[in-house]
Amino acid sequence: MTLRFVNWIILVVSAIIMSTVIARAETQQDAVLSCFSNMERGVAWETCLETMFAPCAGQDVGSPSHLGCLSQERENWRDAKFKAETGVLERLSEDGMTELSGLMLAWPKFVEDKCKAVAESRATISSEAASLGCQISELALLTNEMTACLNGVSSEAYCQLRDE
């Protein structure tokens, strides 16, 4: 085999692996968002947390592999939030945009303060894992809200969509 053929094989295998990782992340996120939507029907928050953190559940809390897994999950949720947020921003009315702008300006500080407190309260276990877990859950909740707005089921004041 030539070096060019080996490089081609490596590239193809890498593409397949990455597409599988991306598909798994979307499927995992869909399961979490579905869980959130069923909380009104009696599904417990703890059930949604188990679903949310299932990809990292088999690892020792706070270990390098666990923190790496949580960091990857945070990035997956950041991407999902950005995608949903972009969809909402493209469709909001002027009044909705004004309302959402105020909320989104305050959101990073809210998450920072909340996750700092969560990390401090779990310092004996793993403050870094607790902080990452908090960030993931806040990103997932915001993704859920943005998705609900896009689907026309949000009751939040900002969610005033323009007609398409």
Image (cartoon, rainbow, N blue to C red):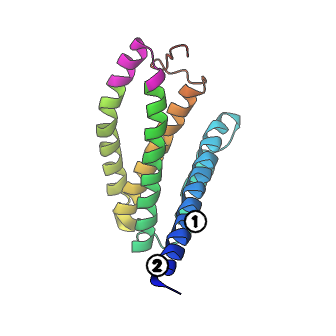
**Which residue does the image show at 43% across and 40% down from the upper left?**
82
Q: Is residue 98 above or below residue 2?
A: above
Pinpoint residue 15: horizontal percent, then vertical percent.
53, 64
The residue positioned 38% from the left and 65% from the top of the image is 126
SS for callout 1: helix
Position of residue 110 measured from the top left corner of the image (x, y, whole percent): 33, 38
| Disc 1 to disc 2, C-alpha distance | 19 Å
| Nearest the eye: 26 or 123 | 26
Q: Which residue is mark 2?
A: 4
> Residue 94: within the magenta?
yes
Crowd tier of the residue under label 2, counting other residues whose Cα lies within 10 Å: few below 14, some 14–19, many 20 or above = few
Question: In the image shown, does 99 or 89 lie closer to the viewer?
Answer: 89
Spot occupied by residue 99 in the image (x, y as percentages of width and height): 38, 18
> Which residue appears farthest toward the bottom when viewing the image?
1
**Left or right: residue 134 compared with residue 22:** left
Q: Quadrant of residue 122?
A: bottom left
User: Magenta span covers which residues?
Assistant: 90-101
Q: Is residue 121 above or below residue 113?
A: below
Q: Position of residue 73 (x, y in %)?
A: 47, 56
Q: Which residue is mark 1?
A: 16
Amino acid type, label 1: Ile
